[in-house]
Image: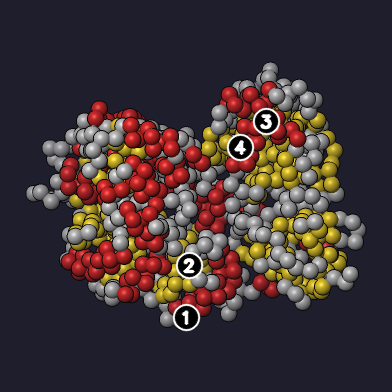
Amino acid sequence: MRLLIGNHIDDSIRLRPETRAWTQRILWFARDGDLIVLPDQPDTRFVNYVTALTGVNPATLRFHTPSGGRYGHHSLDPLSLTSPEFVAALAGDLGDVEEVFALWPSAQVSRLSEALGVADRFPGSNFFAQGGGEVANNKAVFRALAAGCGVAVAPGAVCRSRAEAAAATRTLLETADAVMVKQAHNGAGVGNQIVVRDPAMATGHAGARHHHELPPGPGSVDAFWEQRWSWASVEGHFPVVVEEFQPSATSIYAEFHVSGTGVHPTEAGTLHYADGRLSHQIVPLRSGNRRQLVGDATRLAQAYQALGYRGYLSTDALLQNDGRIIFTEVNAQVSGSLHIYQVIAHSIVWADAAPQRLVVEYHVPPHWSVPSFDVFLQAIDDLGVAYDPRSRRGVIVSMPIIALEPDRARFVFCIAYDTDEHRRHVYALLDERFTTNPASQTIAPVHVTAPSSSRAWLGRSVDAPSVSTWPAPATRLRPTFEPALLAGDLSRLTGHDWAKQRIHSTSGVGAEAQVDWRVLPLRSTGGDPERTDPGGPGAEPFAPTPWAEQAPYIAEIVDSIPAPVNAARLMALAPGALSAEHCDPKYALTRGLVRIHLPLSTNPGAILVLDGTAYRWQPGQLWFGEFARPHLVRNNGAATRIHLVIDALLTVELADWFPNDWAEAMHAGAALINRPTAAPPSSPATVVRLPESFLDFSLTDGRDHIPTRSEPTVEARVEAVAEQWRLTVPDGRTFALVHLGDREFRFCGWSEQRTLQLRGSDALLRARTPTSVHSLPVPARLATQ
């Protein structure tokens, strides 16, 4: 038997909080008697579907899932692999293990193998135990190894600072029209950004989800890197690759199995991108370039073998119009191609047998609406395009179809075909059956433009980008919670007379709500148990209230939010209550501030109408709404509707709780993403002369004003008081500050939409949107005691 681990890239490198469907592709590699570890129990229908094609007896397969860990059962928490309880459960079901096979060979898999006494059955165990997986999958490391073995790569540099990245970009743009910026760890174009001078340049064929157009002017490159270094380097954790963009090239790859005895070519294929995202791939590669590709790629594979890597390995390359091949990266893991060629193409379709076949795997496009696995299987049967072993042509579903939102399943499927005409015909039938949204509404690479000179933008009010960026006014987030535990916490808090909700404005706490809408604060400004308002920038940081101690499960949920949390309030809408339609302009993704709802108790008559769409959210579901849009709530039922309402800052980690299309748009620049906080600096008190509007958070017109030198100013004292940094003005207003690093601060209760950086003889004010940073230097001096 073999031990198969259906894991994904370690969360310390890149978090993918929803991988249940993607990791089940490991079922294609299963043999009779195998023990398979997955984040959640597999889809039984998919198990039976796969094994019917592979000839494996599903009754002989054993599945184990560790405790949910930090991500529930949505993704395999690496730490849960080595919990004593899980190791004991596996050991009790383990036979004679001939191989440990992991989708992502990692240190935790090595530790699990060691704990089970089968480390010698995990190829490369010692290498992975020392963090070799992170080294082998680093694009910066790839460029070094490629240079060492003489394999051609695009001109470029590995950059470890913003200054190095800007210098490399300027150098490349002296002879090229565009550059490619790459995160060290990411895949399928998600971590790539193309930076172009000519907006007409065609770039959709390349694997890059992000696109940036540089305006004319000497400061445009520096402005870009000020804006994107944090994203590219993952908050400074990894180096960044900057290389010349290769227009009009074809993406190809060659894969290998690397063992202690040598490197063995397994297959080659082509990758096809549309609008910057992977659309489909085709195997096998039968062009005349295959020999050159495999020959050059073999030298790369040998370099990784010498490094200590063992297992499957994919080398990605670009085929130029003139026939030259340059390599772009190596994926030292079980790639998304292995099951296509090793199992589907060569063990089911027998693609090389006469008459030859090709196999293409498509990613379902965003404009399709597929509600379930059964619906898709029925459709391919009805259309007559299901795989037929007699003709060796047709559709094979290559991963389970899990709808994370109603009718919005995202999955991949293969078509075995003999001619391009047949392939296009099958795809067209499916496209016609499942298209519900015009393709023009899908999210293409996000195009952003930085100002050529920050000074030119000063003194303007900036409208937030259109809310039409997002697919809907609201979306359900990935985590789910136990309604019974929520109800238990709620029962301990209902004996108290909850106060009516109040608003918060620049002038402080406002009047009570006119409808019967009551609040119990679990987290508030200063931890005040009487504050029913959402709070905002002010003298005290947000903190738990005493009520939170009586609701341990809810408090644990609030603490699990991977972002700074402002207010967390239980909000009770009485029967018969109806609010006026209103907007909360503060809570917009473009401002980096989000409002999240977790229903605890509801009824069919309790409705939120958000931008014309009615929602009835259910207990245990976590929802985000764009409450900057017009909305109202009403309760026509007989029972009180109670929601936990959480106000938080948008972060990289919180963005990954959203559905893929939302998260990709956020990471691509459609939302303002906040940086992590940093340890408070040791700096003396400083007096800064600020434009008065810099302290105005009222958003009376729904827009953020960018301060200018021409408006009235006020002296503000910035200092640490009892380890808390604060900004105080002569009229007595005080604002708690949060340090972001390099003596740059945001206001507690606000996002990085505006920050202040102390620089000695002056201070730099910044006003941010998702696509630009506007800066204003202002006078500053050390405070006199």
Kindly report the distance in space between the C-alpha atoms of the residues bearing marks 2 and 1. 18 Å
Q: Which mark is residue 557?
A: 4
Question: The residue under label 3 is which amino acid type?
Answer: Ala
For residue 491, above or below residue 778: above
Disc 4 or 2, which lies upstream in sequence? 2
Secondary structure beneath dot 1 equals helix
Disc 1 or 3, which lies upstream in sequence? 1
Q: List x then y, in percent, for residue 187.
A: 40, 56
In the rendered view, does 658 fall on the left or right side of 206? right
Query: What residue did someone put label 1 on?
Result: 171
Query: What residue did someone put label 2 on?
Result: 239
Q: Residues within 10 Å of mark 1 (few under 14, many from 20)?
A: few
Contact (Cβ within 8 Å) of mark 2 with mark 1:
no
In the rendered view, does 635 fall on the left or right side of 139? right
Of tags 1 and 3, which is closer to the observer?
Answer: 3
Q: List x then y, in percent, for residue 233.
A: 51, 64
Q: Which mark is residue 551?
A: 3
Q: Residues within 10 Å of mark 4 (few under 14, many from 20)?
A: few
Q: In the rendered image, which quarter is residue 547 located in?
A: top right
Residue 272 appears anywhere in the view: no
Quadrant, the N terminus: top left
Q: Which mark is residue 306?
A: none
Q: List x then y, in percent, for residue 269.
A: 24, 57
Question: The residue under label 1 is which amino acid type?
Answer: Thr
Determine the residue positioned at 75% across, 68% down. Answer: 683
Q: Which residue is the extreme one toward the left?
A: 354
